[in-house]
Image (tube, rainbow, N blue to C red):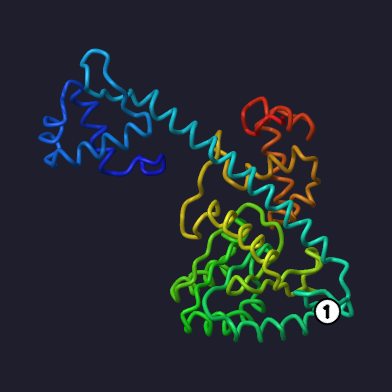
Amino acid sequence: MLAMLGVDAAAEQVYRAMLAHPDAGVAELAGHLAVPEDEVRAGLDRLSALALVTPSHEHVGRLRAVSPEVGLELLMARQQAELAAHQERIAASRAAAARLIAEFADLRPTTEHPGVEHLVGIDRIRERLGALSRQVRDEVMTFAPDGAHTAESISAARPLNEALLARGVRMRTVYLDSVRNSPRTAEYVGWLGERGAQVRTAATLPTRIIIQDRAIAVIPVNSDDSAAGAVVLSGQGTLAALCALFESVWELARPFGAPDHRACHELTSQQATAVRLLADGLTDEAIAKRLGVSPRTARRLAGDLMERLGARSRFEAGVRAVQQGWLPAQP
């Protein structure tokens, strides 16, 4: 029950027993739980590290359980602070990725540059991706910010992915949260999962990226038109940065079959991201593109959030979101 807060099942049993029997020592707790005393002591060590137990002032040398109202609130506050810090690191990684993409955006096919191959046109991109997929040995990591799959895209991707998974290649893909509303995409993700692929979703993604064996990455030159051109990158420093970006987003992304995590004030991850984009002054069209939803859905999201905040403008929505704790205050 408390696993989401970092309390394992054994430690939780000890914590519950201490709340039920506040005067019990280690031996008595072990008797109540029918477990060895060493297991109780191990649980106490974990609870102490989480500040759920503290030394008793009444019984010297004995620990007492902190009330759930205080202890669990501290755990949630700590977890929220860690999440905020992690989100800041992701934001910094995304900014670094954006600079990296901009650095290569103006490259031309004739440009000489070590570790960079420029591809022009969808036919050349698909041809090169097909060749690269046949060379994969261990792993493929993908950001797929293009929204729900079309029947054509599934038809093109299915044989390539089936061949990779049949060879034992580890496949991890992050889609936008919005694809959960697409029955066609959900069916395809289920098909991938049956063959061993892992799929998660995030509210937003920085750009489309395909990373193979942590040695080669393919990214579009123009994120608004991924079919127009792409670059194949193989520089060691570049790949290290892109792999770090993928891992940071993957860690916070939600497994496709898992229920939605609620952010503060019962916001979904998509709503929390929409609040941040509103506060940044983005238009409904820009928000729609970032979330992978229709402009109509983006307008509905923005309207609902502004109504909940009691705001009449996007600027006021940003101010109220900070005041109500939906967004961190700017330093």
Give the number of callouts.
1
In the foreground, 294 or 155: 155
* Quadrant showing the N terminus: top left
In the rendered view of the protein, which quadrant contains the C terminus?
top right
Residue 115 appears at what percent x and percent y?
75, 74
Where residue 281 sits, quadrant-wise, is top right
Q: Residue 275 occupies which quadrant of the picture? A: top right
Crowding near pointer 1: few (<14 within 10 Å), some, many (20+)?
some
Amino acid under disc 1: Val
At x 73%, y 43%, the residue is 277
Q: Residue at the top extreme? A: 58
What residue is at 56 percent from the left and 59 percent from the top?
180
Dividing the picture into quarters, in which one does residue 122 lie? bottom right
Q: Residue at x 28, y 38 (%)?
A: 12
Residue 14, image x and y in percent? 23, 35
Residue at image position (47%, 51%) is 259
Residue receiving disc 1: 120
Q: Classify residue 170 as left or right of residue 151.
A: left
Left or right, residue 21 beside residue 193: left
Nearer the observer, 3 or 30: 30
Compared to residue 41, the image places residue 172 above or below, namely below
Give coordinates of residue 173: x percent, y percent.
57, 66
Local SS, label 1? strand
Q: Position of residue 174 (x, y in %)?
A: 59, 62
